[in-house]
Amino acid sequence: MNPRPVPSWTGRDSGDECLFRDSDGERIHVLNATAREIYLLCDGSRSTDEVAREMANRYTVDQSTARTNVDEIVEALVGLGILAPG
């Protein structure tokens, strides 16, 4: 899967967090710094495996842990409609 952003959502950095709102301004979600990094890596050009490898390298964690965390966050963001599966 190569997840990508859904255009109807806009994000704005706020300190270590990122605020996302839908085009109607009715729904707002806050991402922590790690979820924000994963979101930014999910630009449609990378698979979730590639995103997990990048996060494992950035945070010096094992690949299995990174993969589990990336999968959970991507699944949540797809469920919220912020990311689309690709």
Image: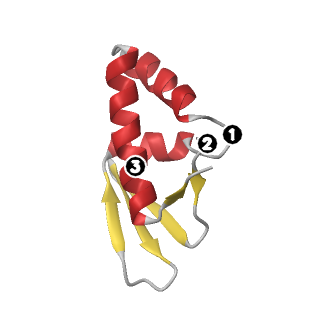
Camera-nearest residue between 4 and 85? 85
Camera-nearest residue between 30 and 53? 53
Q: Look at the numbered discs 3 and 1 and tell me whether their residues touch, using CB distance below 8 Å.
A: no
Q: Residues within 10 Å of mark 3 (few under 14, many from 20)?
A: some
Q: Which residue is mark 2?
A: 2
Drawn side of residue 16 relative to residue 7, left or right: left
Q: Look at the numbered discs 1 and 2 and tell me whether their residues touch, using CB distance below 8 Å.
A: yes
Q: Is residue 59 above or below residue 38?
A: above
Q: Check disc 3 and give the amino acid type.
A: Glu
Structural distance between the alpha carbons of marks 3 and 1: 17 Å
Camera-nearest residue between 32 and 14? 32
Secondary structure found at label 2: loop
Where is residue 53? Give x, y as percent.
50, 21
Q: Which residue is mark 1?
A: 45
Secondary structure found at label 1: loop
Q: Earlier in the sequence, mark 1 or mark 2?
A: 2
